Amino acid sequence: MPQNKPIPFLDFAAMHAELRPELDAAFQRVLDSNYLILGSEVEQFENEFAAYCDASHAIGVGNGLDALFLILKAMDIGPGDEVIVPSNTYIATWLAVSYAGATPVPVEPDSATYNIDPARIEAAITPRTRAIMPVHLYGQPADMDAIMEIAARHKLKVIEDAAQAHGARYRGRRVGALGDAAGFSFYPGKNLGALGDGGAIVTNDAVLAARLRILRNYGSSVKYHNDVKGYNSRLDELQAAFLRAKLKGLDLGNERRRAVAARLTEGLSGSDLVLPFVPDWAEPVWHLFVVRTLAREALQAQLGERGIGSMIHYPIAPHRQGAYAEMGLAEGALPIAEAIHREVLSLPIWPQLQAEQVERVIQVCLEAAAAGPRA
Ligand SMILES: *Cc1c(COP(=O)(O)O)cnc(C)c1O
């Protein structure tokens, strides 16, 4: 039998090979312009990305964490305020709230979708609550209508953490313009990734957008006139140029991820792995394909032995991280998130993944399930 080539969890070489001429041209354009900060590439990318999200404004910033943090600052959310966050998320969601000086208040997920459970939000609202920050985790939209309805009733802002969901749709509408503002990350591994760090804020609120443009650039709209104590968090011209090239292929890339997800779902449906659940109102973009099993470590080991990359998103819930020890939330405090963190495994999913590679992933998962110790 021929030696099978390893299947990496994510393959930047394959991704970039496809786009090489466009990325080279983008680099040349910026090098020739000698305009490196807040120039026309950023401006054009902002226009193109806002249009892509069906939103009025996009503001390029340094990274996804800054996008979320700057939204909170622009909304004057800070010390003494509480922001509702999912207990099941990447820690950046919580850190954005902490950096703003506010307190993250975790709410458990729906155990079918892994996203924040709207039915549990109201119990977490206090007189200090200012905003809800749902995450479209793994590329699947959160149940936004239910969240918006609760927010309207309690006069709360809604900030989407869309860092994993570029292009996803909720009831036919793109994520990013469903709440008051959204934060996106262009970390290289995201569905729309830069060749380095990058992020953007998307909003339909012109006043908020204007505040954010000032906040990201030293609190200044006119050079050397600083009206507020701002930050330095700008999207680079070079990254904006790369992102413009990659944005053109985002829908096709998401379509290819969808085809991989459909085949993985079909091929694994007979196994006892818990597969992703997609509500009928959701059009996910499959940033990750996450299966759930009590025998996670065994499955990951078997995949590894057969040269197949997999990752755990995420191994430790934010409230169980050293960074949040101050909250005093012991093991068992947020049991749904903790169980998810113990049992999930992400299989390879990227646009250039070949059909035969997908079949091999399915085959190894089925073999592992047949052989592995069941719990
Ligand atoms: C990646 C990510 C972020 C942060 O983005 P960076 O660009 O890495 O700062 C925030 N939230 C979620 C859910 C993410 O996946």
Image: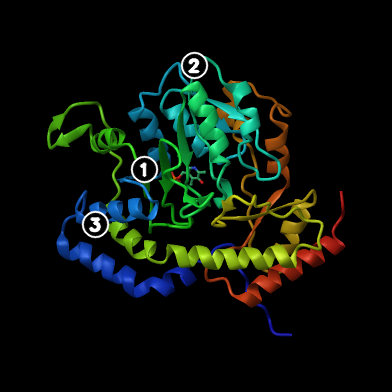
Q: Earlier in the sequence, mark 2 or mark 3?
A: 3
Give the distance between the C-alpha atoms of the residues marked 1 and 2, in whole angstroms: 25 Å
Please state which amino acid type lies under the numbered disc 2.
Arg
Residue neighbourhood size for the residue with mark 3, other residues' Cα within 10 Å, grouped as few (<14), some (14–19), many (≥20): many
Residue neighbourhood size for the residue with mark 2, other residues' Cα within 10 Å, grouped as few (<14), some (14–19), many (≥20): few
For label 2, the residue is 128
Which residue shows up at 65% across the image and 24% down it? 329
Left or right of residue 359, residue 198 in this image: left
For label 3, the residue is 41
Q: Is residue 360 visible?
A: yes
Q: Determine if the C-beta at disc 3 is less than 8 A from ligand 1.
A: no
Residue 124: % across, % down: 60, 22
Mark linked to residue 13: none
Q: Determine if the C-beta at disc 1 is less than 8 A from ligand 1.
A: no
Question: Compared to 328, does 232 lie above or below?
Answer: below
Please state which amino acid type lies under the numbered disc 3.
Glu
Left or right of residue 363, residue 63 in this image: left
Which residue shows up at 61% across the image and 33% down it? 118
Please state which amino acid type lies under the numbered disc 1.
Ile
For label 1, the residue is 201
